[in-house]
Image: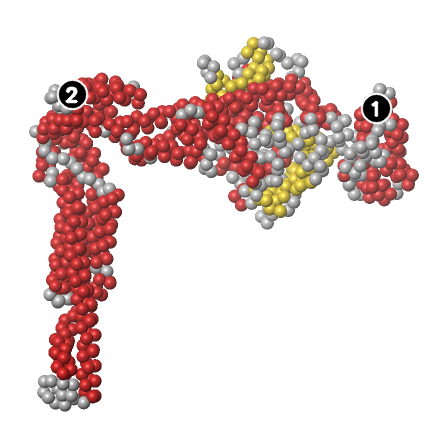
Amino acid sequence: MNNKATSQDSSREECLDELLAELSDPVHKRLIQAYRGNDPVQSMESELGKILIEILHRED
Amino acid sequence: MKIKDITIQGFRGFNEERTIDFHDRLTLIYAPNSYGKTSISEAFEWLLYGITSKVEKADSKVEYKGSYRNRHLSESLTPFVKATFVDDNGNETEFHGDLAEDEIIQRFVNGQEVESWPLAQDISKVPKPFILQHALKYLLLVRPDERFQGFAHLLGLEKLDLFQRNVVSLCTKPDACIPAEVNQLLKNISALEARLASQLSLATIEKAFKKGTADLAEAYEAVASECRQRVPPETGDESVLPQLLKIREDAVAKIFKGHIALPGYSEEEKHANTEDENFFLKCIADPFVKRYTELLALATIQHILERAEFFDLGIKLLDKTPEKCPFCGKSINDSLAKHIHDEHANLATEKNRTEVLQKQRTEIMELLKELKSRLAAYHTRQIDKSAQLLELEPTLGKLKTILVPKHQTHFNAVETTILELTTAKNNLETSYRKALEALAKAETSVTESKEDTALVKVLGEALVEYISDIRSYVQAITGKVSAVSDAAKILKHELDALAGTEDISVLIDLLEQRCNVEKKFEIKGILDGLKGLRKSVDQYVANRVLGAISGELTSEVMEWYGQIKTTGDPDVHFDGFDMERTRKGELKARRVQIKAKSYGKELVSAVSSLSESKLNALGLCVSIATNLKGESPFDFLIIDDPIQSWDAEHEIQFIEVIRKLIERGKQVILMSHNRKWIDMVRSGCCTISGRFYEITGYTETGPHIAEIPWVKWTERLKEVDAIVKDQTATSVKLQQAEGEIRIVNAELTSELYFKIKGVRKKPHDLNSTKVRKMLLECGIENSLVDRITQTFETTDDAHHDPVNYAAHRQRIQRYYSWAHELEKLLGDSGSV
């Protein structure tokens, strides 16, 4: 069971690392980085919400 | 790992328990259609993956619900599939899967329950060791996106496929991730932009805004320029906005004075309200009532204090003449003197208690004072909330002429709100007055030392009623805030339209909302930028898939495809894999291209150009190539009905493919409904040892499976004879001949034993010891038994040749003649 999880994780990490190296937009990087979470979709979606809220609450 | 055997009970077409033993190189299973052949491959799939591809791909899972369990299986039995797998070192492991509740597989390894199979590789990432007709359909003859998924699945890139789909989903539909308050900002600024667009005089600004974030500064320069044209020339920069506000206010006031406003409760205000209400309730709680009641004792203590003063004076005088009373002169004995002093001490204690109660009275007074003060502040706060709106009540008639009939709903909202809030406010004022009156009476009772428990009770009731009214009032306001706010916007726009100040109003809002406008543009920029992220991910994934399909996979599929291709085939063939591209040469997302050529000319697509039989061949080749590619724990391949829609020539070509798979180390389990072809495979692979099963019938108990000898021993002996006589035969050929003799001897022994003892023993399981024992039991003379047993000396019990093995023609000739002797004993009746 552990072997399975580790193997899947390492392959995913590898792909994400490669893609991150190709991206330049910091927002895009944050979203892809969030995909590393245990619940990737939820984690990516909530990261987008967080980014937008940060802009909304930013004091200029 | 290879498969030694499989046992199936109650699964799909299998009811009663059946076991099938597999040869480690080739096993053929023939069955007419619907005899349970495919149930065998499904049993393997389910055992390994917990789901069959048929169910996995089904459009309607409901239709397949409950389809694993055989309907005829006894209620008391659990459906199961178990298989024995053998690794490279000959170690056996039993995988057992019980069909548990909700069609979940319950796994056991050598009898011990496990969560997952103990395999070195993650089997979800390696190609499934199955080539199934219905699966090929899902690979080629499907929509491009499904084909892409099929290839990702075959290439072990499912996680990448899932990742891409998830990112695309987020990038194309991000709305669900936008927080409500961000959405509100976007909505507000969009409404402002719509108003801007409606003002022809502000077209320059609108044009600048349309350029987006990069030119926002330019847009605001245009705003400043337009503002300047509407204020007196001498106006300083900092006064532009106040000046615009004044111009608008003056113009609008000529039409209507007053504002529709009903502010909601902020989080801070809600918190403050809760704090105050808790304080009010604490004031009338039990500890307060107890302390208030204790003050009642002060009244009865008063006369004690007067007595104490009298006593104090008497004691002072008594100190001077202790032997007689200072008032009447009567003599005082010791006993009387003690009594007087004790009485005085008791009075002192009472006096102290009085002081405590007086302090308590002061505290209660202060508490009631604070209650009064906080109650007043709290009440004012609540009343102020609706004050501005309720002030509009006398002007409702005028408001109606402005809003009705165009905005009847909004007017009604305002009118209803005013009506409801007036009632709520009146109730509130009444209960507030009652609370104040009760509070005043309680205060007076304390001040005048006329405490009365009933007064505290009335105060408590009044405060509870007041808080209840407050809550109704707050609820009424909260429920109307949104509708009133919408009406306020409408009124503002109508007044601007009537006063001719729409452009000024837009300019005011643009100035006041500048920060929010900038935020909106930034947020829009991020949301629009998700398209860029999607493109980056699409290109990345497309490149990864291209790398996987275009190089090695293409050449390997080509190689296998070449095996099936016949010389008589028209030159219209598969020509490799690629990813579709745009005109600019960029890779299209999720578009696997299957190329084809016709006599050197490129065709649009193999899917639309190749015949069904060629597509079928291509699908098989893709599955074979991916199965042989990369690391996989499986050294077997289960092929179910591969030759559908093929002509005889292609069928024969595919036998060569099977031979090559076996040569590459794969254990092949081949199933077909075509008896003629399966016999051809058996004959084409006769030099390869194998097992052959025929499903001879099917009843509700399940399929009837019979094992048939791989090759007739007469044919085997003929083959051996030919090899021995061939002086050019290589040592490999001679070794093969020696192996054939052993198979013949095992089969002859099995047949003799069945004829004489009536018990059938599987020839495949026999070794020298078992053969000797069986032949002796059959009464065969010792010298022949010794000779037959000797034919097994150049092999071990696992049917492998010893390390120092060498093929000798003379020895093999001797073995051949002994096998003939054994055959004669069987006579004509023993032939198969």
Question: Which residue is rendered at x = 32% and y = 28% of the image?
Answer: B523
Mark closer to the chain start, 2 or 1: 2
Side (left or right) of B435 relative to A22: left
Q: Chain of mark 1?
A: B
Q: Could you tell me if residue B435 is visible in this image?
A: no
Side (left or right) of B538 relative to B154: left
Question: Which residue is rendered at x = 85% and y = 41% of the image?
Answer: B772
Across and down, in percent, residue B115 comes to 57, 43
Residue flagged by tag 1: what amino acid is it?
Answer: Ile
Return the residue found at the far top.
B600
Name the quadrant of the N terminus of chain B: top right
Name the quadrant of the C terminus of chain B: top right
**CA–CA distance in space, label 2 to label 1:** 109 Å
Q: In the image, which disc is placed on residue B723?
A: 1
Q: In the image, which disc is placed on residue B228?
A: 2
Return the residue found at the far front.
B320
Q: Nearer the viewer, mark 2 or mark 1?
A: 2
Where disc 2 sits, the SS reads helix
Question: What is the quadrant of residue B294 in the picture?
Answer: bottom left
Question: Which residue is rendered at x = 32% and y = 31% of the image?
Answer: A55
